[in-house]
DNA sequence: GAGTTTGAAACT
DNA sequence: CAGTTTCAAACTC
């Protein structure tokens, strides 16, 4: 870890040092602080090392980050209040220092030292060795960031413990820069102490800008960032670059508190009339972040979106408050996102990934709720994001690309929110440990939206969940296997039968309906959007997707098909009868060993990727929420095809999201579902 | 929102 | 394997 500017840090000319030491200001500072100069330099460096240390490195867990944000929010207020106090007391440096010390103790927010902030050159020369050493210190004492932006004296006091741990050699190296830093600091304190603080805070902003640039590349690695406690510490020449690297390379999570901080900065800047801060820098990065944030807002619900370009034109305070609102909402998504630990109705996910780069966890988790992963590994919410004008307001309001982008982002976010609020299980007596429970059956932990009682289907009861699952599987090995299987032309070719029959799907075990005529969602076949098959034991089957008796199996029998289509016009089947392809309604006999056949088809990444029936249930829930009279239009417009439940557990109540089969659909929408042999419920147990 | 209906899951 | 019970979602009012 060689620092490019390593040479710069070393020994400042002695004459310069003496000059500062001889200054009245320096003497006065020394009289206030019992800490020796050598230590102070240490402090400076140690603190800088903290700036390099990504918060996510310390707290990789999203949960922790949530807490952290809360902490930051609260303490930001402390800082603000204290800041005002300090401004009023600027004439009394001693008091100001004390106040600053208190504020620093309260605020774990700013991890930049005044020395490095106020002195562009003084902080440059932090040796890599020093970083290595002090990174450890930072880990040991994450709270050291508390004494960040305060007076040097305060920092000295707070860092005393750190100073004792650092080497004397480093102390000597950094002595001069720090002294110079202190000197300038003092001068600033005399003039605009408040402004200094604000400016320091603003320094964080570049990370946002850079992060925006880096987000595109980072998106695909988000999961790693979430879970891997990256220890990468990038060295840069100045504090700004440090921040940039920190947010852009170590973890996007770190941007969350940063963003919060930036909001505060914006507000504070607005108050102080200083508009050259983060808000302005936002503008600089808009072109990039407008694009990236939309992506991130989709796959990273918790990721702050800093690209609300419309906000640029707004009052700073309004701008920041809007951003804050966005963030607060996204935070809720994050909280939700972390809850379920397995499943996604994606029993086959590991298999899917065999031929692909494994999607990161964050994508997977975000996919849980109504999102569908695109082939490139990103997550795309299948929504009407293409129609920003429908969001509200006039078309004129969406003229600018920025606003359109904002609208898209908001739409995506709203979908995430909506998905997150989707109803889940409502178990009362099963403790959510039986297949009665949709969540359990789908391989999902129960989460907040669930209304279950005495739920044991939670991560804290993982052991019990696993045992129960084993028990159920011992009774029925296919209990968590996909209930609804989809056969395609390829499958049929493999089977060597009826290779003229197009894609279709059937319930593997079949339904047993007696009264619903397979026209209501009581019927698992109907609920899954598949036709009944000879495997079904239903009575009076009128399944609009295909009757057991094969009314639509004739294929060439237009009347039979019409009859089925007519049945499909039933209100209960409104949402699926939009297929134009009559062959979709053919009744295909389901081979008993479909898993074998399908697995053969899943040898290629393409096939495997097509397996991704991701976020099915939630998407389906969203579909169900569509008013019936509107559904056909919507579905037709979206080319929504059969709703298939592949790779999901037997409980078909939770239905997979639709997989679009229209030729005009995008790649992600045209994904076909191919059953393959998959380990049931793989996500429960690590391989 | 409460009550009913329904069929899968679980049990015997 | 069949019959019964339990259960929770779907449905109705």
Image: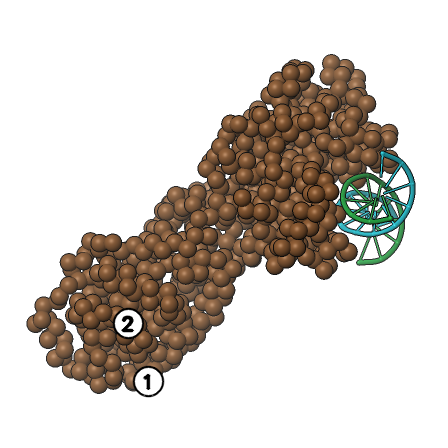
Chain colours: A brown, B green, C cyan
Q: Chain of mark 2?
A: A
Query: In the current view of this chain or complex, which residue is farthest to the left?
Result: A15
In the rendering, at what x and y percent does residue A446 appear?
65, 53
Q: Residue at x 45, y 57 (%)?
A: A60
Can see residue A458?
A: no
- Residue A95's mark? 1
Find numbered disc 1 in the image and state the secondary structure of the residue it sits on.
Answer: helix
User: In which image quadrant can residue A348 be found?
Assistant: top right
Q: Is residue A275 left or right of residue A39?
A: right
Q: Earlier in the sequence, mark 1 or mark 2?
A: 1
State how far apart marks 1 and 2 are (Cα): 29 Å
How many residues crowd mark 1 within 10 Å: few (<14), some (14–19), many (20+)?
Answer: some
In this view, the residue in front, A186 or A20, is A20
The quadrant in which the N terminus of chain A is found is bottom left
Q: Residue at x 73, y 59 (%)?
A: A453
Q: Residue at x 50, y 30 (%)?
A: A605
Q: Is residue A26 above or below residue A576?
A: below
In this view, the residue in front, A650 or A67, is A650
Q: Residue at x 30, y 72 (%)?
A: A162
Q: Is residue A321 above or below residue A576?
A: below
Q: Chain of mark 1?
A: A
In the rendering, at what x and y percent does residue A30 appear?
21, 82
Find numbered disc 2 in the image and state the secondary structure of the residue it sits on.
Answer: helix
Q: Is residue A667 left or right of residue A152?
A: right
Q: Is residue A279 above or below residue A618?
A: below
- Residue A165's mark? 2
In the rendering, at what x and y percent does residue A522 appear?
79, 40
Q: Is residue A585 above or below residue A620?
A: above
The quadrant in which the C terminus of chain A is found is top right
In the rendering, at what x and y percent does residue A99 appear?
36, 81
Mark 1, mark 2: which one is toward the viewer? 2
């Amino acid at each position: 870890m060689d620092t490019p500017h390593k040479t710069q840090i070393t020994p400042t000319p002695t004459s310069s040092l003496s000059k500062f030491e001889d200054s009245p200001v320096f003497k006065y500072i020394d009289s206030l602080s019992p800490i020796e100069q050598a230590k102070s330099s240490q402090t400076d460096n140690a603190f800088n090392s903290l700036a390099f240390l990504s918060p996510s490195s310390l707290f990789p867990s999203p949960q922790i980050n949530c807490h952290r944000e809360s902490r930051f929010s609260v303490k930001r207020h402390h800082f603000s209040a204290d800041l005002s106090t300090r401004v009023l007391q600027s004439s009394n440096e001693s008091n100001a220092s004390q106040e600053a010390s208190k504020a620093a103790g309260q605020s774990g927010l700013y991890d930049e030292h005044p020395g490095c902030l106020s002195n562009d050159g003084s902080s440059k020369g932090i040796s890599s060795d020093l970083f290595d050493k002090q990174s450890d210190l930072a880990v040991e004492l994450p709270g050291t960031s508390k004494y960040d932006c305060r007076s040097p004296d305060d920092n000295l006091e707070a860092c005393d413990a750190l100073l004792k741990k650092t080497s004397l050699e480093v102390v000597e190296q950094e002595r001069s820069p720090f002294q110079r830093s202190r000197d300038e600091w003092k001068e600033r304190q005399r003039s605009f102490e408040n402004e200094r603080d604000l400016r320091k805070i603003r320094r964080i902003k570049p990370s946002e800008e850079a992060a925006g640039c880096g987000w595109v590349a980072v998106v695909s690695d988000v999961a790693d960032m979430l879970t891997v406690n990256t220890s990468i510490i990038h060295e840069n020449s100045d504090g700004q670059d440090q921040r940039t690297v920190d947010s852009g390379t170590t973890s996007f999570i770190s941007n969350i508190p940063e963003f919060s901080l930036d909001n505060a900065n914006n507000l504070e800047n607005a108050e102080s009339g200083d508009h050259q801060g983060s808000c302005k820098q936002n503008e600089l990065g808009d072109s990039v972040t407008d694009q990236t944030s939309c992506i991130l807002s989709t796959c990273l619900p918790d990721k702050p979106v800093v690209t609300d370009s419309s906000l640029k034109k707004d009052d700073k305070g309004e701008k920041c408050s809007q951003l804050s609102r966005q963030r607060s909402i996204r935070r809720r998504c994050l909280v939700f996102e972390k809850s379920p630990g397995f499943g996604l109705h994606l029993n086959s996910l590991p298999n899917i990934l065999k031929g692909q780069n494994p999607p990161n966890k964050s994508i997977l988790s975000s996919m849980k709720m109504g999102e569908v992963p695109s082939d490139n590994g990103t997550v795309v919410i299948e929504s009407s994001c293409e129609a920003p004008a429908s969001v509200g307001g006039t078309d004129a309001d969406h003229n600018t690309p920025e606003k359109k982008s904002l609208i898209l982002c908001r739409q995506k976010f709203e979908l995430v929110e909506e998905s997150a609020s989707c109803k889940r299980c409502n178990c009362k007596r099963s403790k959510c440990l039986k297949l009665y429970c949709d969540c359990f059956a789908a391989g999902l932990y129960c989460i907040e939206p669930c209304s279950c009682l005495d739920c044991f289907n939670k991560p804290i009861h993982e052991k019990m969940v696993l045992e129960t699952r084993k028990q159920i599987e011992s009774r029925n090995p296919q209990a968590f296997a996909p209930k609804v299987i989809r056969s395609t032309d390829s499958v049929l070719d493999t089977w060597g039968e009826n290779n003229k029959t197009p894609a279709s799907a059937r319930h593997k075990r079949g339904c047993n309906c007696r009264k619903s005529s397979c026209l209501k969602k009581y019927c698992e076949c109907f609920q899954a959007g598949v036709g009944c098959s000879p495997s079904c034991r239903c009575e009076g089957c009128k399944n609009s997707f295909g009757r057991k008796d094969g009314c639509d199996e004739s294929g060439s029998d237009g009347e039979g098909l019409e009859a089925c289509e007519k049945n499909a016009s039933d209100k209960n089947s409104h949402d699926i009868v939009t297929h134009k392809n009559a062959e979709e309604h053919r009744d295909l006999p389901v081979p008993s060993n479909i898993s074998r056949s399908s697995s053969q088809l899943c040898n290629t990444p393409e096939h495997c990727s097509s397996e991704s029936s991701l976020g099915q249930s939630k998407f389906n829930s969203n579909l169900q929420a569509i008013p019936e009279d509107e559904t056909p239009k919507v579905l037709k417009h979206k080319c929504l095809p059969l709703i298939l439940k592949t790779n999901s557990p037997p409980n078909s109540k939770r239905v997979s999201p639709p997989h679009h089969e229209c030729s005009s659909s995008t790649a992600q929408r045209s994904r076909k579902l191919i059953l393959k042999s998959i380990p049931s419920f793989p996500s429960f147990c690590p391989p």
